[in-house]
Amino acid sequence: MPPPGGFEAVQYKRNLPLRGPSGLAILGGVTALCAYGFYRVGKGNIEKRELQREKTWSRIHLVPLLLAEGDRDAFRRTQAALEREREIMKDVKDWEAGKSVYNNPRYRGAESIVVL
């Protein structure tokens, strides 16, 4: 016969403890983390755009200076080459430094350079 009060209830369910946060909490955390990441990426893009703008404007403002430096250097080199030519050819009669060696008018490309 059964004991007084009946038998104990049979445990047929798994008794697993709850571990970690719920799925909703994980989804909320991932959403917050992604939102913060997108915020940082946006701030980085703004900073990168500002640096690019600054670099572009600095190059725009430096172009005249660099062109002038290049012109001065080219002029100095041309004058030095003419002086070297005068020094080397000083003993040759009727030699003009900087004058084209071509007599045919077809080859007049070098004479179009103005020598000061």
Image (cartoon, rainbow, N blue to C red):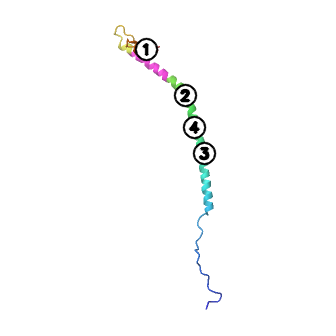
Instruction: Between label 2 and label 3, give the one nearer the viewer.
Output: 3
Q: Earlier in the sequence, mark 4 or mark 3?
A: 3
**Cα–Cα gap, marks 4 and 3:** 14 Å
- What residue appears at the point 59 percent right and 64 percent down from the top-left corner? 20
Question: What residue does disc 3 label?
Answer: 42
Q: How dense is the environment of label 2, judged by Cα within 10 Å: few (below 14), some, or many (20 and up)?
A: few
Q: Is residue 96 above or below residue 8?
A: above
- Which residue is at the front of the view, 87 or 12? 12
Label 1 Cα crowd, 10 Å radius (few <14 / some 14-19 / many 20+): few
Q: Which residues are magenta?
A: 70-84
Of circles 3 and 1, the one toward us is: 1
Q: Is residue 10 above or below residue 89?
A: below
> Which residue lies most toward the top here?
94
Spatial CA distance of label 3 from label 1 is 58 Å
The numbered disc on residue 51 is 4
Label 4 crowd bin: few (<14), some (14–19), many (20+), radius 10 Å: few
Q: Mark 4 or mark 1, which is nearer the start of the sequence?
A: 4
Residue 17 among magenta residues? no
**Mark 4 residue element:** helix
- Kindly indicate whether the residue at mark 3 contacts the one at mark 4 (C-beta within 8 angstroms): no
Q: Kindly identify the residue that appears in the image at 54 percent across and 28 percent down.
A: 62
Q: Helix, strand or loop at disc 3?
A: helix
* Camera-side mark, 4 or 3: 3
Name the residue type under label 1: Glu
Decide whether the magenta segment is chiefly helix, strand or loop: helix
